[in-house]
Image (spheres, rainbow, N blue to C red):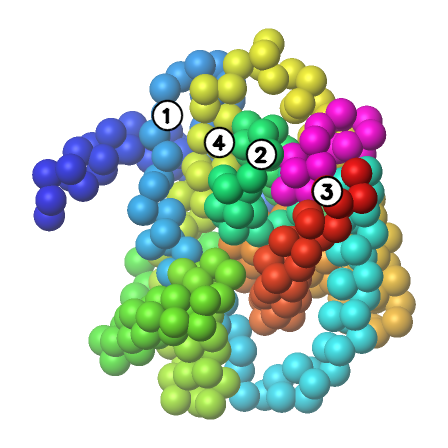
Amino acid sequence: MQPRYLERCRRFLPTLTLGLAGGGLAYWCQLPLPWLLGAMVATTVAALAGVPLQSPGKGRQGVLVVIGVMLGSAFTADMTGEVAAWGISLVIMLAATAVMMIFSVWFSRRIAGHSWETALYAGVPGGVSAVTGMALSSGADLRVIGITHAVRILVLLVAIPPVLQFIGHIDISNASVAASQWLWMPAFSDIVWLLLAGVIGVWLGKRLHLPSPLLFGPALVSAALHFSGITHAAVPPLVIAFAQAVIGISVGVRFAGAPVSEVGVAMLMAFIQALVLLMLAIFAAWVGHWLTGYSAAAALLAYMPGGAPELSLVALTLGIEPAFVTTHHLLRITLLVLLLPLLLRRLVSNA
């Protein structure tokens, strides 16, 4: 390994330890989504307290590949009819996304007083990595965009357990992995298939210029392998828990270097915006459940305006139709990335 890479790993180790400790404590307390929420809360509190934390960096990229492979394993051959029947739900999701986008941009522009560029990129319901990259070449306020997306994901992830208990009529506590299952490992041939899905998926995702190629490229290749029946390989629970912890850490460290006294207003605006978007997602989930018959819990995770890795990982962890959730987020992010330049050009020209 290169010395610079080893140095980054060494600097990230204390942050990783903090996140794993938070996840372990949450698991010991039998909290829902312990490794994700525990790591996220621990690092968020530390970041806001001024503790120097290190971002996962390329470590998060590797975790995205793992999550993509895991998500692809949810596409099995016996769900052929279900995929064809998702059309109505996808339309509902797109309609809900449009409403969320309109409200977010209006709120950010008129209430928070941000520029059109900042309002647009901060108001995008999801796709934080792609959105931030696109905002670099504009006059948008990157700190406001980062805070808005970070607060939104934080609010949504914290709200998921109680909201799912209410809207989904499911017992999240039963989704926890038993201690005896932590050491389970797949067969060697299954490990090979999973690795191939990751490697080929990264290449394919970049080749096709997919949004979040490290996530959706491996997801597509893994889905093809599992849907065709070539493999039924599953990812070990220990790897899933580690992926959850790293994703939780990546959310928490976004608050590093952001003193509450200086960005309090931006955080308050983002918090209010996130709550309204959550209410819109809940309403859309009920509509989707009523029109399609799909579970309200799956619809909620599919319609939520958060990050695809976080929400898809929640669906996978809780066993709430991860293929359904992933497909919805892939379609939304793809359309948003394609339409953002057009929307920005129209907004600025009409300003």
Residue beneath label 3, please?
348
Q: Residue at point 59% right, 88% down?
A: 78
Residue type indicated by callout 4: Arg
**Of callouts 4 and 1, which one flags the residue occurring earlier in the amino acid sequence?**
1
Quarter holding residue 157: top right
Q: Residue at point 55% right, 28% down?
A: 143
Q: Which mark is residue 66?
A: none
- SS at circle 4: helix
Circle 1 residues within 10 Å: few <14, some 14–19, many ≥20: many
- SS at circle 1: loop
Can you give x and y, in whole percent of width and height, for residue 210 in the image? 49, 66
Residue beneath label 2, please?
139
Q: Residue at point 30% right, 66% down?
A: 185
Q: Which residues are magenta?
A: 107-121
Residue type indicated by callout 2: Gly
Residue 111 in the magenta stretch? The answer is: yes
- SS at circle 3: helix
Residue beneath label 1, please?
53
Residue 284 in the magenta stretch? The answer is: no
Residue beneath label 4, please?
254
In the rendered image of this protein, does residue 174 appear above or below residue 139?
A: below
**Distance Cα–Cα, label 4 vs label 2:** 21 Å
Overall secondary structure of the magenta section: helix
Can you give x and y, in whole percent of width and height, for residue 321 in the image? 63, 68
